[in-house]
């Protein structure tokens, strides 16, 4: 299993401000990021696992859409979330 319930609840509290706020954009992005990291490591070992690769691509595109939505909705949350998750580097 990629995340224990304890770790998952901790992430939901941190990014969703409440344990019940599981549907917020930030929480969805964080949980997808952890699943993507887990599947990436899985695919390094099992290179021919086509079904997992397909799921990884779907998750990556869903996360991309959610990040795009968050950027349009609230640029400050977007920048802070990406810096916390180390997803993109800023070009100054």
Image (cartoon, grey):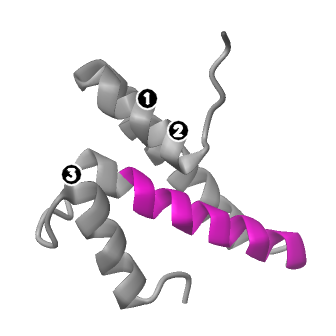
Q: How many marks?
A: 3
Direction from residue 17 to residue 58 in the image, left or right: right
Q: Which mark is residue 4?
A: none
Q: Are marks 1 and 2 in contact (CB under 8 Å)?
A: yes
Direction from residue 33 to residue 66 in the image, left or right: left
- Taking the spot 49% from the left edge, 82% from the top edge, the residue there is 3
Of helix, strand and loop, which one carries label 3?
loop
| Residue marked by disc 3 | 24
Residue 66 drawn above or below residue 39: above
Magenta segment's dominant SS is helix
Q: Is residue 69 visible?
A: no
Direction from residue 47 to residue 3 in the image, left or right: left
**Mark closer to the observer (3, 2):** 2
Q: Circle 3: is it few (<14), some (14-19), or many (20+) Cα within 10 Å? A: few
Determine the CA span between mark 1 and mark 3.
Answer: 16 Å
Q: Which mark is residue 83?
A: 2
Determine the CA span between mark 1 and mark 2.
Answer: 6 Å
Residue 63 drawn above or below residue 73: below
Q: Where residue 8 appears, x then y in whole percent? A: 37, 78
Direction from residue 75 to residue 22 in the image, left or right: left
User: In the image, is residue 72 part of the stretch drawn in magenta?
Assistant: no
- Quarter holding residue 69: top left
Of helix, strand and loop, which one carries label 2?
helix
Q: Circle 2: is it few (<14), some (14-19), or many (20+) Cα within 10 Å? A: few
| Residue marked by disc 1 | 79
Of helix, strand and loop, which one carries label 1?
helix
Determine the CA span between mark 3 and mark 2.
Answer: 18 Å
Q: Are marks 3 and 2 in contact (CB under 8 Å)?
A: no
């Amino acid at each position: 299993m990629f995340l224990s319930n304890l770790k998952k609840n901790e992430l939901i509290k941190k990014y969703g401000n409440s344990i019940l706020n599981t549907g917020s954009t930030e929480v969805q992005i964080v949980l997808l990021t952890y699943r993507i990291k887990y599947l990436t490591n899985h695919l390094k070992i099992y290179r021919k696992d086509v079904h997992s690769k397909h799921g990884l691509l779907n998750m990556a595109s869903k996360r991309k859409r959610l990040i795009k939505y968050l950027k349009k909705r609230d640029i400050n949350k977007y920048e802070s979330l990406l810096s916390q998750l180390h997803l993109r580097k800023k070009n100054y």
